[in-house]
Image (spheres, rainbow, N blue to C red):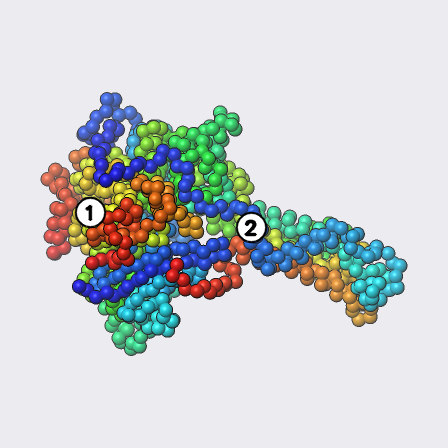
Amino acid sequence: MTTSTSAPEILEGAGVLETRGDPLRFVRAVLRNRKATAGILILALMTFVALFPGLIAPDDPLATIYPPNELPSSAHLLGTTQLGQDVLSQLIYSTRLTLQVTLVVSVIATFLSMIVGVTAAYVGGITDRILTVVIDVFLILPVLPLLILLASYLPPGVTSLTIVLCITSWAFQARQLRSQGLSIRNRDFLVAAKVRGERPLYIILVEIVPTMTSLLAASFLGLAVFVVGFAASLQFLGLGNSSDLMWGTMLYNAQQAAALEAGNPWWALAPGGAVALLGAGFALVNYAFDEIGNPALRPARRRRRGRSSA
Amino acid sequence: MAEALLEVTDLTIDYLTEAADVRAVNRVSFTVHSGEFLGIVGESGCGKSTLLFGVAQLLSPPGEVVGGQAVFHGRDMVKLDREELRHMRWRDYSVVMQSAMNALNPMKSIGAQFKDTLRAHGNASSEEITQRSEEVMGLVGIDAAHLASYPHQLSGGMRQRAMIAMALLYTPQLVIMDEPTSALDVVAQRSLMSKIKDLQHGLGFAVIFVTHDMSVVSRYSDNVIVMYAGEIAEAAATDTIFRRPLHPYTRGLMSALPSVTGPRKELIGIPGSPPDLARPPSGCRFNPRCPEVMPACLTDEPMLYRVGDDAVRCLLYAEDAEAQRPTAAR
Amino acid sequence: MAGHDTSHRDAPDAAGSGASHLSSQAPAEPLIRTEDLTKHFRLGGMFAKRVLHAVDDFNLTINEREIVALVGESGSGKSTVARLLARIYPTTRGDIYYRNRSLHGLRRRKDLLWYRGEVAIVFQDPFSAFNPVHRVSHGVLRNLALHRPELNAAQRRQEAARVFESVGLSSKMLRRFPYEMSGGERQRVGFAQALAVRPKLILADEPVSMLDVSIRAGVLNMMSALRDAEGVSILYITHDLASARYLADRVIVMYAGHQVESGPMGTVLSQPKHPYTQLLLAAAADHEQDDAISGDTGEPPRVINPTEGCRFRWRCPLAIELCSQVTPRPMPIGEAQVACHVVAAGDGSHETRPADAAAVTHASRGQ
């Protein structure tokens, strides 16, 4: 009988599991998912239009040189406004500011909700209670009265809009991120970090937040959907600056000019559609990330294979 | 000789994933006779639980039986439809899962779950249900008053006993168990195994017992199948395997077990880890870790060779035994 | 199968009196000892009445270069002891003395950091013990940065490679992510992290329980080698008597938050005195008949709002009236310390062996 050799002195890691960090695999996963592809196409289109409006828009959006309230024609694919501006050009040029506001608000609000939520979860105790109350207060703030109040103090415009949107939208995700933080705060690796002497801020920023990237991405995307619509709503109500080039202000101006009843309905319908499309783009990408990240959510695949004798 | 209750032949189970098809169980064959206690031993990833689920027809996508058959009472379970299976389930065979907390409904009392089971597989009257429920609780040694208890009110050991009681409601001929003791402490484990063995002697059912714990197998099973990387590595009567293990993997497993009594020997174990079944090594699946590997092992896939009472999948024995599809017991 | 008897160890034995192997030096002061260590958890909020007594009046001693096994089943409090020693939980009562310095006196961050560089903990679950987004070198490098500030970045990388190799891992694996490594490899990383601070004591909380059997041997052998090569003591916490026997020189058996028996490994295993130790041994041993455990179904102990008295009394074949009135404290009996009124009373004449325990059991069941 042969003798067995003892374990090698140094393990070279023969049992390596397949690396999941391969970026190419991720790209392939994205492309295979129809929702992801559609969503990404929409967002890519929007980004392109936002960056290079001049390349696509047929006219200067603010030039009031055309006949007013015209219905769509070959010269003006979406008609003209009451002041004789080309609606299509306005739509295209408004993309940039709209997207900008959406992204800025989403980033700030997500960041705020992350800091507050995770700190509340990790530090616990009195801090948690205080922060939870703060979150709850912001959640139930009546938005409209607050806006009217703020509108009388803040100059109308993009900055005020951004501030107001940040204040009113960060609290949603804070609760969720706090829950996630609570669920992992007793995981061994966090206990290990505390035991080796790390400071709490370090643990929050370096050990906890990086594990939440997919949740943060989902928060961000979900927030973006909300912000797109809400920003447009606020502007529609007149709380923005009507001379800013954004889809929401287009809606406001169209409403003021009674475009749906008396003039060019596309002046109102087009920006509304654009808002919906951008929101849908974010939403599709959000669903897709969920599915890619969690195989259980994927549509069931039935693969019929013939019974082989292997 | 006892009749053959379940004959599994060339059972093959794949997991059909987007990335790759993984062959979790590859052409496994064995026979279980009535009253027999068959232990299936292996470490994580060897496919023993998948095999069990396949035999009990509990696989869900992406897992699928893609080959072979499991003939119970003359009927191939793999080909039966849901209705026919439902009729067989619990009456002819039943299943005890690894963790009672996962298998029992936390919102329902034990008695209510027994009732559900009895109603699902038969037409018993209320009195018969009560009577039978009390009977099985008595069999496993739990006070019948606990029929009103909820799972979380029972200790781990008692929950597992309740699971076994539930499995015996129709006195099946075969009880399939997936590591029912691994969540228990050593005293509870010993007590439970002892009880299972008593019940087996008393009621005469056969047991297929899947575990990673060799000591449980050595004490209680009649026959043992050792699995590795989805295949049978060695299969024989318990005494045979423990007295004289042939497969280097089995020997490695034995050498890794410390004992409380007996001489203090150096533990050796097996270096490395089981292969990724999406890309198994060519030739013998154990060759990267085998202390007795030969050049042929890297290219030739060994079959299951019969050596006396033992069946071994190892090229070391290819010459002095004829390759056959063996049964696990004589 | 080749085997060699390694039961003869030359580590100093400081448990109780009458050590059978004396080293050439007198036993030095213990590395760490606890005094009536107690930990209670209040269940259900600040004003709840239910108190879980995880650990009560626990005294242990660990010397340099020694491996002590802390054995118990679930609910015994062994993991809590580890976490108390690692200062993950504050104590409810009692104190811990590290090199005769009370841990209660450590308040400044500097002092706490010092202690953490002396005593390190390795966790049970190789899957949750690592942050999945960081490479496995992260913990080691952070430990070095925090506890060995004299090293610069390049030296830290070198030291990380060195500790990896001392646990049997190639330094190339430093760049791996946790999911790219097997359970056994991850446990070794856990030990590497602990070694990075150059501790005097490693608290190993069930380090092999979640590993496959064939992998355990390697990790156990590695732990033994660490004691020899790095001179570190290990508190090996486990429910498995067999691996405890393989690794440790001394053993402490816990039940329901109390220490029931402790002593040199060979003595306790061959002549267990406490009924619980005998029960454990009977359940774990290969050659015992099933009825050696005498129908004990392994019910977990009662540690919520417990009453005074021995917590094993409901399962104990030797229980007398005193057992429900006074909690037994460990008393030296032979080379061991045993917490049992009956055994203490019949000291000398009542050394039960496992087979005798079964006989006593049968007799008492007959009542």
Is residue C126 among the parts visible in the rendering?
A: no
Marks 1 and 2: which is nearer the front?
Answer: 1
Q: Is residue C341 left or right of residue B284?
A: left
Closest to the observer, C55 or A14: A14
Quarter where residue C106 is shown: top left
B188 relative to C82 in the view: left or right: left
The residue at 53%/51% (across/down) is: A178
For badge 2, the amino acid type reads Phe
Can you tell which mark lies on residue C28? Answer: none
Mark 1: give few (<14), some (14-19) or many (20+) Cα within 10 Å.
Answer: few
Residue topped by disc 1: B243
Which chain is indicated by disc 2?
A
The chain identifier of the residue carrying mark 1 reads B
**Please, what secondary structure does the residue beneath circle 2 have?**
helix
Q: Residues within 10 Å of mark 2 (few under 14, many from 20)?
A: some
Q: For this view, does B187 lie left or right of residue B295? A: left
Residue C182 image point, x, y percent? 41, 44
At mark 1, the secondary structure is helix
At a point 27% along the width and 56% down the height, the residue shown is B324
Closer-to-camera residue (B66/B194): B66
Q: Nearer the viewer, residue A184 or A143?
A: A184
Number of callouts: 2
> Which residue position holds label 2?
A26
